[in-house]
Image: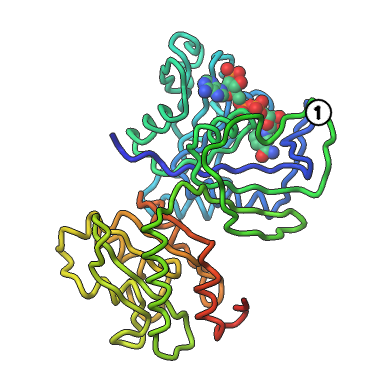
C-alpha cells in the first residue's frame, strides 16, 4: 500500500469557535490576505477535500485562483488544479454545484455503494461502505496524491482529528463573535488521539493565524538525536549566517554521519557536511533519518544545490528538525518541498529555543 498523503486541515473560525453563522448566507471570516495564503496552500496540494455539507452550504469552487500559482504548478509538471474530493453518506449532492461544474480537474466523490449514481456523469464516484477517512486516504494515495488540503466543514474536521489522521492544522481566527448555538462549530465532540503542538502564531491583517502540528511523533530516540544535532552547532566556526548541526542515522538509529555549518568549507551547511561523509550510493540512505537543528534550506546563493535538494537526491525518507528557518535571508520552503515530494517531515518546535540560543548573532533572533 502507498504511503498515506500528508493531511493539512484549514479552517477560519470566529473567536467563539464557529465556522459560520446560522443565517444560510455564508459568513466571511477571512481577509484577502488570508484567502491569498489559503490559495498558496491549495497550490501546494495534490487534492482539496471538503465534506458534502460544505458543498451544499457554500457551493465552493475549490480552485487555485492565482494565475501565477497555476503557472508554477504547470511549470513544475503538475496539473493546473488539484483534484477535488468530497465525501457523502447520503449522496445528496446537486450535480450543478460549482464543485462539479468548475475547473478542468477530476472530481472524486466517496460514497456508499448505490447512493451517488446521479453524480456519475459529473464525477468519479468511489464506492466505500463506510468512508472512514483512512480508507479515503489509502485510495487517494493509490491515485498518486501525496498532500491533501482539507477545507472543512466541521463534520469533516472532527472526523479527521478524531481518527488521528490530521498531520497539520492551519486555523485562522477572525476577531468576531457569532454567539449562536445553531451555527456550525470548527469541531464537534470526539476523542482526539493526537495532541497538537503550536508551531507558529501570526497576525495577518487582524486575523490570528495559528499553525499546529500533530504530535504523534517524535519518538524519544528522535529527541535524543535532535539534541545531539543541536549540540553540534556549538562547533561551528564564527559566521554571519545560521549555526546548525546535523546527525544522519540509519534505520536502526545508529549514527551514520554528523556535520555542522562551516565544517571543512566555511560555506558548507550541516546536512551537506554530514552527507558528504557517505558514498551517495550507500544503501543505508534509503532508510535513513536526517536530524537537523534548522529546517533544511531550499534556496541557496552559495551553492547550486540546496540541502533540501541534496536530501531528496540522497533518497532520505525522513527529516526531523527543531527550528523552522525564519525569514532573515530568504523565504525557506524546505519542509514544504520535502513533504510535497512525499518525505516524512517531523518538526519539533519545543526544541527551537535551544537552536535560537546558538544563533542570537542573527538579526531579530532573541531568546
Ligand atoms: N470557516 C471555514 O473555514 C469553513 C470551511 C468549510 C465549511 N464551513 C462551514 O461549515 C458548514 C458545513 O459544515 P458541516 O459540518 O455541516 O459539513 P461538512 O463537514 O462539510 O460535511 C459533513 C458531511 O460530510 C459527509 N461525511 C462526513 N463524514 C463522512 C463519512 N465518514 N462518510 C460519509 N460521509 C461523510 C456527510 O455528508 P452527507 O450529509 O451528504 O451524507 C456529512 O453530513 C457550513 O456552514 C460551511 O459554511 C466553514
Can you give x and y, in whole percent of width and height, for residue 166 in the image?
Answer: 51, 41
Is ligand 1 closer than 8 angstroms to the Cβ of mark 1? no
What residue do we see at 55% from left, 86% from top? Answer: 361
Nearer to the camera, 138 or 231: 231
What residue do we see at 47% from left, 79% from top? Answer: 242
Label 1: state its secondary structure: loop
Drawn side of residue 356 relative to residue 136, left or right: right
Q: Which quarter holds ligand 1?
A: top right
Nearer to the camera, 313 or 82: 313
Q: Is residue 214 above or below residue 314?
A: above
Drawn side of residue 217 relative to residue 94, left or right: left
Q: Is residue 45 above or below residue 19?
A: below
Q: Is residue 290 visible?
A: yes
Q: Residue furthest bottom?
A: 238
Q: Is residue 346 above or below residue 360?
A: above
Can you give x and y, in whole percent of width and height, for residue 179 in the image?
Answer: 85, 35
What residue do we see at 48% from left, 60% from top? Answer: 348
* Quarter the N terminus occupies: top left
Q: Residue furthest top?
A: 114
* Mark 1 neighbour density, 10 Å: few (under 14) some (14–19) many (20 or more): few
What residue do we see at 60% from left, 78% from top? Answer: 365
Q: How is the image coloured?
A: rainbow
Drawn side of residue 304 relative to residue 208, left or right: left
Can you give x and y, in whole percent of width and height, for residue 360 in the image?
Answer: 56, 82
Q: Which residue is mark 1?
A: 181
Count of numbered badges drawn on the protein: 1
Q: Is residue 297 visible?
A: no
Q: Is residue 175 above or below residue 160?
A: below
* Quarter the C terminus occupies: bottom right
Can you give x and y, in whole percent of width and height, for residue 346 in the image?
Answer: 43, 55
Amino acid at each position: 500500500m502507498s504511503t498515506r498523503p500528508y493531511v493539512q486541515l484549514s479552517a477560519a473560525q470566529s473567536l467563539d469557535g464557529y465556522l459560520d453563522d446560522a443565517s444560510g448566507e455564508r459568513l466571511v471570516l477571512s481577509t484577502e490576505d488570508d484567502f491569498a495564503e489559503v490559495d498558496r496552500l491549495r497550490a501546494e496540494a495534490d487534492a482539496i477535500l471538503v465534506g458534502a455539507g460544505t458543498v451544499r452550504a457554500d457551493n465552493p469552487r475549490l480552485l487555485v485562483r492565482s494565475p501565477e500559482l497555476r503557472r508554477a504548478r504547470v511549470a513544475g509538471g503538475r496539473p493546473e488544479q488539484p483534484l477535488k474530493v468530497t465525501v457523502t453518506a447520503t449522496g445528496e449532492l446537486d450535480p450543478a454545484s460549482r464543485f462539479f461544474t468548475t475547473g478542468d480537474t477530476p472530481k472524486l466523490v466517496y460514497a456508499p455503494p448505490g447512493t451517488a449514481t446521479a453524480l456519475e456523469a459529473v464525477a468519479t464516484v468511489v464506492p466505500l461502505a463506510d468512508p472512514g477517512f483512512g480508507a479515503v486516504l489509502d485510495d487517494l494515495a493509490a491515485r498518486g496524491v501525496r498532500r491533501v488540503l482539507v477545507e472543512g466543514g466541521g463534520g469533516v474536521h472532527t472526523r479527521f482529528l478524531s481518527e488521528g489522521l490530521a498531520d497539520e492544522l492551519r486555523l485562522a481566527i477572525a476577531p468576531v463573535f457569532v454567539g449562536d448555538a445553531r451555527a456550525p462549530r470548527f469541531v464537534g465532540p470526539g476523542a482526539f488521539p493526537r495532541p497538537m503542538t503550536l508551531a507558529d502564531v501570526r497576525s495577518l491583517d487582524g486575523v490570528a493565524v495559528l499553525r499546529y502540528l500533530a504530535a504523534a511523533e517524535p519518538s524519544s530516540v528522535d529527541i535524543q538525536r535532535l539534541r545531539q544535532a543541536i549540540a553540534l552547532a556549538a562547533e561551528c566556526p564564527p559566521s554571519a549566517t545560521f549555526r546548525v548541526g546535523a546527525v544522519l542515522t540509519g534505520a536502526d538509529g545508529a549514527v551514520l554521519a554528523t556535520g555542522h555549518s562551516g565544517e571543512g568549507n566555511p560555506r558548507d551547511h550541516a546536512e551537506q557536511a554530514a552527507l558528504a561523509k557517505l558514498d551517495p550510493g550507500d544503501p543505508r540512505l534509503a532508510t535513513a533519518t536526517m536530524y537537523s537543528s534548522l529546517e533544511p534550506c531550499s534556496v541557496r546563493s552559495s551553492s547550486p544545490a540546496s540541502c533540501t535538494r541534496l536530501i531528496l537526491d540522497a533518497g532520505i525518507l525522513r527529516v526531523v528538525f527543531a527550528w523552522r528557518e525564519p525569514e532573515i535571508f530568504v523565504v525557506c520552503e524546505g519542509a514544504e518541498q520535502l513533504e510535497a515530494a512525499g518525505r516524512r517531515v517531523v518538526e519539533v518546535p519545543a526544541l527551537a529555543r535551544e537552536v535560537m540560543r546558538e544563533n542570537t548573532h542573527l538579526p531579530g533572533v532573541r531568546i
